[in-house]
Image (cartoon, rainbow, N blue to C red):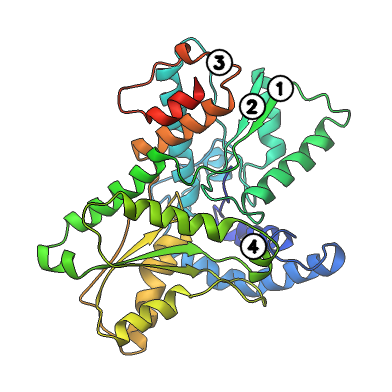
Amino acid sequence: MNLGGPTHEDNVRIFLENLFKDEDIIKLGGGNTQNLFAKLISKFRAPNVAEDYKEINGCPNGCTGNKHCFNRQNKVVSDCCSPINGLTELQRRTLEKYFKKILPDHDVTVYTCMRYWLPFADQIMDDMAEDGITHTVLMPLYPQFSWTTTGSSFRDWETTLNKKFPNGGKPWKEFHVKNYYLNESYLRSINARIDEALEKMDGDTRRKTHLIFSAHGTPLLEVRSGDPYTTEIKETMEAVMARREVKNPYWLSYQSRVGPQKWTQPNTEDLVQRHLEYGIKNFLMVPVAFVTDHIETLYELGVELVEDMEEEGFEFENFEVMKGINDHPDFIKALAEETLHCLRHEIPAEAVQWDNTVNKTRKSATA
């Protein structure tokens, strides 16, 4: 389960409208008021957002996304496709291959279910029913739980499920992964990407580099209502740093504010500017809450942030954005571990042919 993203300039507005209609993100009470707000703001923002997607187009040589993508079906090469589509499809295929390796005696199919663009929950349920699925694990590509992300995806799934099977007669057993922000394999994948970025620098630059862990912000109203997201983000960052032998200075910030509410602080742009004002000019941005590269990482951090700082007259000595964990082997392993933990009473531990680098703690829990 992932956010999704537009696949063509023509559906940027629809994607944004779907996003702003979500009562878990923009709390306007739903109904006509929310729908009108979503229509107006999406129409206003779509042209600029489309230009941003064009700058980071994820499928310049043809569709790399899901089989439900219109571009794939119509053999269209889009110049305005979110990278999240192709990268999530890559994660789906890689995880499915991994399951075939470690569960050779079971038929495992991995599906992609997006929240705000294709493929939607109803399409995936049709595919699952046609494939004769007996056990289903809902796996959010959000390691930290928030009602605005994982919670919204689960709610949308349940709403769709009740419409499709109104008498509760779904043909599969269903399990949910709530979060996995301290999974050792997941933490290793982040540290591996940090190491990859630091190793490209010379020794002096590496020593001077500050790590800025940047997470998608959330309204303070959510934090005050008990949403665990910000706590889990901080615990993820501290767990990552606790596993590093050489500890660069590190900081946490939040990006991507949407709507009129007050959001979590400090804002990423403000934090970077504050560092620059103190004379710190070497940064590695670590997108801690994002598991696929998309507009928040490639454009907001990689393009917009740098341009905004330079327009303010600031200069960087070195500025890097960590590559997303995407299909990193340790992240794929984390998804498999969490899935099988849900199925520990359905699939015997001895049926799983783990490789020797698997997280022994999780394997023990699965057993």
For residue 67, above or below residue 266: above
Q: Residues within 10 Å of mark 1 (few under 14, many from 20)?
A: some
Residues at circles 1 and 2 in contact by the CB criterion of under 8 Å: yes
Amino acid under disc 1 = Trp
Q: CA distance from mark 1 to mark 3?
A: 15 Å
Residue drawn at the location 42% of the way across and 19% of the way down: 102
- Quadrant in which residue 212 is drawn: bottom left
Of circles 2 and 3, the one toward us is: 3
Return the residue at label 4.
16
Residues at circles 2 and 3 in contact by the CB criterion of under 8 Å: no
Say whether residue 203 is left or right of residue 231.
left
Instruction: Please tell me whether mark 1 sits on a helix, a strand or a loop.
Output: loop
Q: CA distance from mark 4 to mark 3?
A: 40 Å
Quick one: label 2 or label 3, which is nearer the N terminus?
Answer: 2
Return the residue at label 2.
136
Q: CA distance from mark 2 to mark 4?
A: 29 Å
Quick one: label 1 or label 3, which is nearer the N terminus?
Answer: 1
Q: Position of residue 2 (x, y in %)?
A: 57, 46
Quick one: label 2 or label 4, which is nearer the N terminus?
Answer: 4
Amino acid under disc 3 = Ile
Return the residue at label 3.
347
Instruction: Please tell me whether mark 4 sits on a helix, a strand or a loop.
Output: helix
Return the residue at label 1.
172
Q: Position of residue 124 (x, y in %)?
A: 66, 34
- Quadrant in which residue 37 is drawn: bottom right
Q: CA distance from mark 1 to mark 2?
A: 6 Å
Instruction: Please tell me whether mark 2 sits on a helix, a strand or a loop.
Output: strand
Quick one: label 4 or label 3, which is nearer the N terminus?
Answer: 4
